[in-house]
Image (cartoon, grey):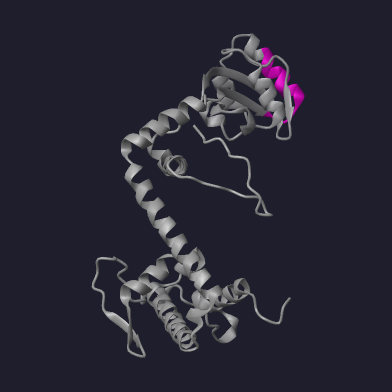
Amino acid sequence: MSNLLRPALVAGLLACAALVVPALPGGSTFGAALSGAALAQTPVLNLDPAASDPVVARVNGGEIRRSEVVLVMQNLPEQYRSLPPVYLFDLVLSQMVDRKLMVAAADKAKLGDDPMVKKRVEEARERAMQEAYVTREVEKGMTEEKLRERYKKMVAENAGEEEIRARHILVQSEDEAKALIVELKAGKDFAELAKSKSTGPSANSGGDLGFFKKEDMVPEFTEAAFALKPGGYTEAPVKSQFGWHVIKLEERRKAPPPEFEATKDELRQQVARDSINEIVARLRADAKVEQFDMEGNPRPEQPKKP
């Protein structure tokens, strides 16, 4: 590596130093020590953006307002956001003061005129503008109607997987299982036999396992259960790691789709992805784009996406 620190490395070092959680006596950390009664006494910090926005620090006359600190806090990784807000506020504010001092020193050294700095500032500006534009456009299209349209498409594309409802009687020996099959052939009720004979946790409900898919059960059990017809039972004992089973199939069905409300987060992601693709396609259709290879040679014109 060059004797000059690379910008990415510097950024990484600053990020690591940004929130150093102080250690307490005995080796415990600041966050770990704030628990129980200590947390109960922690003052509550109002994180509502609409709350008052006082000046919380001045650095050589320049102001830092409460809202600026809260914005940084809300964008921190989860492990930091789990700290009590009042303590986290002080840590973030301290680092923001340090940043202001470093930026002032950089300005004094006229680093703003450095071509590489200018380039990185422009890249940061472009990134911020891109994010702001995409966020605005995606939010405009994030309607209830769009979500429900995407839900219908998701349901149609993911036909329900087959699942069955079955009962079983679990015993410890093959002979016990064979004796149960004899009783069933003689007309005994499966659920009643399960209640009196099964050693499994479903005994109280007559061996009822509810609905399940193939991957929900051990392979031996699944193979035997899914081979049955509704109303039928296994006429030979089925062995698994749990013991010996006699299985009865109650019914088959296609698994119902998840409820709309339960899939809203996933739907929002899908609608956002669709919106971004539409935005990019629209912008490309209205623009003249020329691309070149790594040597600067023109590439053949690419057909525009429909």
Tell me where the magenta segment starts and ends, as one range: 171-182
Q: Nearer the viewer, residue 124 or 115?
A: 115
Quadrant of the image containing the N terminus: bottom right
Residue 142 visible to the viewer: no
In this picture, residue 14 sits left or right of residue 260 = right
Residue 175 lies within the magenta run: yes
Residue depicted at 46% across the width and 89% down the height: 108
Task: Please name the residue shown 26% across and 74% down the image.
Answer: 53
Look at the image and tell me whether residue 295 can be seen. Answer: yes
In the visual, does 19 lie left or right of 169?
left
Residue closest to the eye, 273 or 249? 273
| Image coords of residue 304 (percent x, y) | 52, 36
Q: Compared to 33, does 213 lie above or below?
A: above
Q: In the displayed structure, would residue 232 be above or below residue 217?
A: above
Main SS category, magenta section = helix
Residue 90 lies within the magenta run: no
Q: Residue furthest front?
A: 297
Q: How many marks?
A: 0
Left or right for 34, reference 172: left
Q: Position of residue 28 (x, y in %)?
A: 56, 79
Who is closer to the viewer here, 74 or 245?
Answer: 74
